[in-house]
């Protein structure tokens, strides 16, 4: 009999996304996004990250904690294809997989040693929900991880087009200055489900402590309100 496979949560991410709506569909799409990785008490050992500051990027292996299911489907509908075309699950990065494991490459901005939390990793460009459990962290190695000539399948055949963001100044002032570029970058990625195209609909998303409402028409996203 095979031995059971166990995975330990070594850390959790702390980001501005308390809900799935609005999270970029891939890591690195919004490099202005900042987050922290805080290790679980058992792994708050500074020697465990010794040397990591020498790498500009790291790989995160994590769990789609809100997509855990007891069943799975061999095909899914990628948003990039409009949500109407079925593709094999192993040919996509869909969260709905036999094992709900995600993989993200993020920029490592700095490492700080906190007297209570131990080593804290400050990262940029993460596409993870606040509180997401992380199973492992590995350095990104340009020598072997970068494949400039690799084929991108249906992703390069249907590139994602950014929206123009209209953010009235009186609403933008409600956003902390250090997070304004990140929020605008998130909105430009079009947070709506791919099959939505209703110019009269008002959408709402949470970003940090803020609720941001907006509408989209003719490739232009207009922020209609920002509230705490």
Image (cartoon, rainbow, N blue to C red):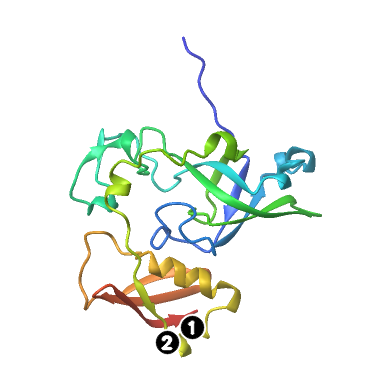
Front one among 8 and 87: 87
* Residue 172 drawn at (x, y percent): 49, 83
**For the residue labelled by badge 2, is the local secondary structure a helix, a strand or a loop?**
loop
Question: According to the image, label 2 marks what residue?
Answer: 168
Callout 1 crowding tier (Cα within 10 Å): few <14, some 14–19, many ≥20:
some
Q: Residue at x 24, y 39 (%)?
A: 87
Callout 2 crowding tier (Cα within 10 Å): few <14, some 14–19, many ≥20:
few
> Looking at the image, can residue 202 be seen?
no
Badges 1 and 2: C-beta atoms under 8 Å apart? yes
219 relative to 185 in the view: left or right: left
50 relative to 76 in the view: left or right: right
Q: Residue at x 34, y 77 (%)?
A: 214
Q: Residue at x 18, y 50 (%)?
A: 84
* Residue 221 drawn at (x, y percent): 33, 76
- Disc 1 to disc 2, C-alpha distance: 6 Å
| Among the 4 quarters of the image, the one containing residue 50 | top right
Question: According to the image, label 1 marks what residue?
Answer: 172
**For the residue labelled by badge 1, is the local secondary structure a helix, a strand or a loop?**
helix
């Amino acid at each position: 009999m095979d031995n059971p496979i166990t995975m330990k949560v070594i850390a959790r991410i702390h980001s501005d996304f308390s809900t799935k709506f609005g999270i970029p569909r891939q890591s690195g799409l919004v490099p202005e996004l900042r987050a922290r990785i805080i290790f679980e008490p058992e792994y708050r050992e500074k020697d465990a990250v010794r040397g990591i500051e020498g790498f500009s990027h790291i790989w995160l292996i994590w769990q789609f904690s809100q997509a855990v299911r007891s069943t799975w489907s061999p095909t899914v509908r990628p948003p990039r294809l409009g949500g109407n075309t079925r593709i094999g699950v192993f040919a996509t990065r869909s969260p709905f997989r036999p094992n709900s494991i995600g993989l993200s490459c993020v920029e490592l901005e700095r490492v700080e040693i906190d007297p209570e939390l131990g080593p804290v990793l400050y990262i940029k460009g993460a596409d993870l929900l606040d509180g997401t459990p992380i199973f492992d962290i590995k350095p990104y190695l340009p020598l072997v991880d970068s494949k400039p000539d690799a084929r991108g399948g249906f992703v390069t055949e249907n590139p994602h087009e950014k929206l123009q963001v209209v953010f009235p100044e009186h609403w933008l002032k409600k956003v902390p200055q250090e997070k304004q570029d990140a929020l605008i970058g998130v909105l430009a990625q079009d947070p709506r489900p791919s099959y939505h195209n209703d110019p009269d609909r008002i959408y709402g998303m949470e970003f940090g402590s803020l609720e941001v409402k907006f509408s989209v028409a003719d490739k232009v996203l207009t922020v209609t309100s920002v509230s705490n």
